[in-house]
Each structure stands twice: as C-alpha cells, then as structure tokens.
Amino acid sequence: MSTDTQAIKDWLKKHQISEVECLVPDMTGNARGKFIPADHFLSRGDPRLPESVLIQSVTGEYADDHWDFVEPTDADMMLVPDASTMRLVPWAREPTAQIIHDCHTMDGKPHPLSTRSVLRNVLDLYAAEGLTPVVAPEVEFYLVARNIDPDNELEPPEGRSGRKETSRQSYSIDAVSEFEDFVEDMYDFAELQELQVDALIHENGAAQMEINFDHGDAMSLADQVFTFKRTVRETAHKHGIYATFMAKPMQSEAGSAMHIHQSLVRSDSGENIFVDSKGEHTPELMAYIAGLQRYTPELISLYAPNVNSYRRLAPEIAAPINLNWGYDNRTTAFRVPHSDAAATRVENRFPGADVNPYLAFAATLASGYLGMKQKLKPSEPHLGTANMEVVEVARTLEEAVRHLQDSPEVKDVFGELFLRAYTSVKLDEFEEFNRVISSWEREHLLLQV
C-alpha cells in the first residue's frame, strides 16, 4: 500500500467518513466525478471515469469534433486521489469527504486534457530551473437574490435590514455586516476545509465581495480556489440566496475578477529572485513582466474563458484592456505593488472570477517563464490611467481562442492536443451563445433596420 493510500485510509477512518466525493476539475473548472461509499473507495482500486468528461462545454455538451481528442470508444481514464486535497464536506448531511483526483491514461501517464496536468507541467518547468512559483489569488463574487427564471435580470439580495443595496459600498464594513450570517458560515466552512482565506472586503458592486487567499504553492492554491467556489455557492444556498462568479453578472455593476499575485523563489533557499541583495528589482522581474505582455494576447481565453467574460474587459470599467504595466498602478494590466523587498511580486489583473484556476495559474506562470527564458524586455512602466487607452486584447471569446495556437513555444508548454481541444470546446460555446437573439436586438433592430 502506497504512502498516499495509507494516509487516505487513516484519514477516512479518523473522521468516520461514510461517503467520498471523487472530484475532477473539467476544462471549464466545474467539478465532475462520482460518489463512492467509503468502505468501497480503497478496496476497489482507483476509480475510473470516461475521459470525455474533461472536454464537456459549460453547458454539458460536446463539440462536433470531440472524438479527435479522446478515443472514439469513449474509453475510461484512471482517477488517482491526491491525499493533500482531502477535505470534509461541511454542508453534507452524513460525514463526507471530498478528494481531488489526478487523471491518468490507462497506461498510467498524466492525461494531457486534465487541467491539473497542464498546471503541473508548468510547475515542472520551474522546478527544473530550481525555482518555485508563489501565488496569492484575490477572488471576487456577487451575492444575488434567488433567480429561477434566466430571462429575469439579477438583483442584490436583501440584507439583514430587509433592504437591498443600491449605492456603491467599496470597503464598507456595514455593507458586509448586512450579510453577517452568510459571512460567518462561509468562514466556518472554509476553516473546516483548511482553506487559507485571509481578508474579506466589500467590493464596488452591490453585494459584491472579495476574498484574499494567503500566498503559497500554486497547485495548492488552485485546489483551494476550486473548492472555495463550491463552498461559497453552497453557503449561499443555505441562506436562500445565490452566489455567482460570473465575470459580469449585471449590466450596471462592476465585473468580478480573480487577480493573481505572483513571485518566484529559489527552491533551496526561498530567496525571491525578483529583487537583488540591495532590494533592487532584477532583470528576471522585468523579463517576467515582458513575458506577460508578450503572451497574454494569445492566452487571454484562459483568463476570460466564457462569452460573458468579455463584457468585463471593456474600457472605463476598472478592468484591463491593454498590456501596460506599472508600479502600484491599478489601471494597468500588470501591477507591481509597493512592498518590502521579500514580498516583491507582480499582480496579473486580467483573470476574471469565472476562470478555471488551474488554467489561469498555468497561463500567467507560463508567460513569465517564457519571458525569462527569452530574456524579453518590457515596455516602460505606465504612469497614467491605462484603461482609458487603446484596447489591445480580444473582445470576444471567438477572437481570443483563434490566437491560442499562434506560438510554437505556447504549444510546447500546454501541449497541442490540449490547445486544440480547448479551442474546440470554447468555439462550440461561442456558437451556441451566438444562436440566442438578445432583447437588445429585438428592441433596436426589429423595426428599424
């Protein structure tokens, strides 16, 4: 019995677990998998799933060419549990465990369409250089009133005062207190699952919150964000409301982001390579920023993965629209915050809250890696208001994915099969969305064109 298997067995026994959720993050970042009774979980070997679950669209459909990416027989893949992801399911009625699994082909290799595999490949590139990425995500979301009919616009929920928010409440303590019961339960659930959440603030939108995570290992933080999204949605259901991580859920409100702070340390010493012994910024930091500038146009669909994502990436609404960087400049795409030397880092402000965290982390870390390997040079730091300037990134999902395979070096990092499959899934989603006629079109075009 392997060390991981024994650790899982001991943990299940310690917590008297009756059922195990075997979880797999799919391409969209949704949880796929199966429920298995705890007494069967280890006695029957690694569970299996059809490999096609990895390439379902956000609607649960498959692209017409999906057989080009998986076996036409719809073959199984093996699920290998990661003991480091074992957590209780605090909202379950019976003692239930959730364990995130790696996906392997039947010959035991990491599955190339698994988003965890994609991130691990990027981390392995850093490990070969003796480096360890450190990330700290900031995740925004909205609380909204229950909405049964998708034709109805979303609205803020009533707080404990019985009123709905109607004005901007950035950083308001009282506005957060309106949802005190939700917040307390969310923190309790997070603590039970050992999620390293830090500060909670009220963001600019009505009933919009932001949670900051402690900095740490990229894979662990991706797992935690994946788990956190489920946790927030379940907590909201408990209180009779919804929580949404849509990038732009309401026309009149700000979008929701998942900003990613990132730095690199030497694996043996923990030394931050973005500063030298005198506390000055290093060429590695500049090359890393240049990599973000160079590869974001090609990888933007991993930061904005849904048709709705591009409603957030629009001029003058506090989201990046071009590739500028700056020192402590929140209007730029890439921000170097003021900090002490050891905490020197870059903040990537492109990712929306709707991202698959594994792919967003992989994209930003891969961009920085390629920038350093090629010794790229960034533009001059931007001193003005960057989001009033020219748009430099795709404005639709279709445009974004058509650039995904432009660079051979991006294909080498992510794998051509994965990039082709991701493109196929996202183009299928775009075409499905494009078939829907909107109320704007009926209002302005019906009798006037």
Image (cartoon, grey):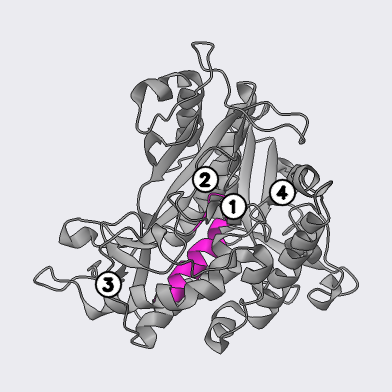
Q: Which mark is residue 41?
A: 4
Classify mark 4: residues with Cα within 10 Å, few (<14), some (14-19) or many (20+): some
Locate residue 149 relative to residue 164 in the image: left or right.
right
Locate residue 344 relative to residue 385 in the image: left or right.
left
Quadrant including the C terminus: bottom right
Q: SS at mark 1?
A: helix
Earlier sequence position, callout 4 versus callout 3: 4
Residue 237 appears in the rendering: yes
Marks 1, 4: nearer the viewer: 1
What residue sits right under mark 2 in the picture? 255
Q: Quadrant of residue 171?
A: top left
Q: Are marks 1 and 2 in contact (CB under 8 Å)?
A: yes
Q: Are marks 1 and 4 in contact (CB under 8 Å)?
A: no
Q: Main secondary structure of the magenta part?
A: helix
Percent x, y for residue 86?
A: 55, 47
Earlier sequence position, callout 1 versus callout 2: 2
What residue sits right under mark 3 in the picture? 268
Q: Residue furthest left?
A: 278
Classify mark 2: residues with Cα within 10 Å, few (<14), some (14-19) or many (20+): many
Distance, label 1 to label 2, CA atoms, is 8 Å
Earlier sequence position, callout 3 versus callout 1: 3
Q: Quadrant of residue 371?
A: bottom left
Tell me where the magenta segment starts and ends, as one range.
Answer: 351-368
Q: SS at mark 3?
A: loop
Q: Which mark is residue 311?
A: 1
Quadrant including the N terminus: bottom right
Percent x, y for residue 108?
A: 69, 74
Distance, label 1 to label 4, CA atoms, is 43 Å
Amino acid type of the residue tagged 1 in the rendering: Arg
Q: Residue at x 57, y 48 (%)?
A: 247
